Image (spheres, grey):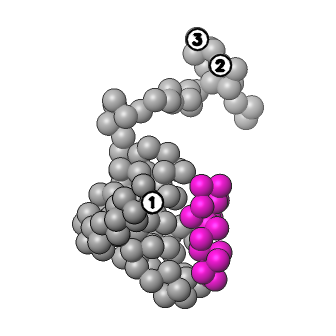
Amino acid sequence: MAKNLKSYNEWLSSKLINPERAARYLDAASKESPQALRKALRKVAESRQMTELAEKVGVSRESLYRMMAQTGNPTHNNLDGILRALGFRLAIVPLKPEDSTAEPASAHSTSGSRDKPEVLAG
């Protein structure tokens, strides 16, 4: 069984060297969950040289592994640094209506009632 896992990891690493494929892989993982993104980011990073990547980001190799662990919590600056060192950047795009799961908060009411306008002291 371990032999199959090793060959899969080797196969995946060989595919993630391609920037377009790695970008699609990271994008799909980011849509799933923050943990999935960190795991995918680690897979992409492992397809390259982790020591070189850590130097580009400005952190130790061990810190890089911790940031991309399932329980990791990289800062925005570290995440941005990792992505840029790998040749990617974060992008903000509008959600499609079917992608949105949260109701937007009302900008006109602090009491939760939409019938009464908010009264501002002047």
Residue 81: percent from the left, percent from the top? 51, 75
Can residue 29 be seen by looking at this rendering? yes
Residue 101 appears left or right of 8: right
Query: Residue 115 occupies which quadrant of the picture?
Result: top right
Residue 20: percent from the left, percent from the top? 25, 66
Residue 89: percent from the left, percent from the top? 40, 68
Q: Could you tell me which secondary element the residue under label 3 belongs to?
A: loop
Residue reaching furthest to the right? 121
Q: Do the CB atoms of the residues marked 3 and 2 lie less than 8 Å apart? A: no
> Residue at image x 40%, y 59%?
5
According to the picture, the residue beneath numbered tag 2 turns out to be: 112
Magenta segment, which residues?
59-76
- Compared to 35, does 56 lie above or below? below
Which mark, residue 2?
1
According to the picture, the residue beneath numbered tag 3 turns out to be: 115
Looking at numbered disc 2 in the image, what kind of residue is underneath it? Gly
Mark 1 or mark 3, whichever is nearer to me: 1
Q: Could you tell me which secondary element the residue under label 2 belongs to?
A: loop
Residue 28 appears left or right of 21: right
> Residue at image x 63%, y 15%?
113
Q: Could you tell me which secondary element the residue under label 1 belongs to?
A: helix
Q: Nearer the viewer, residue 112 or 66?
A: 66
Residue 37: percent from the left, percent from the top? 47, 55
Looking at numbered disc 1 in the image, what kind of residue is underneath it? Ala
Give the Cα distance between marks 2 and 1: 55 Å
Mark 3 surroundings: few (<14), some (14-19) or many (≥20) residues within 10 A? few
Residue reaching furthest to the top? 115
Q: Earlier in the sequence, mark 1 or mark 3?
A: 1
Give the Cα distance between marks 3 and 2: 9 Å
Q: Nearer the viewer, residue 1 or 41?
A: 1
Residue 117 appears left or right of 50: right
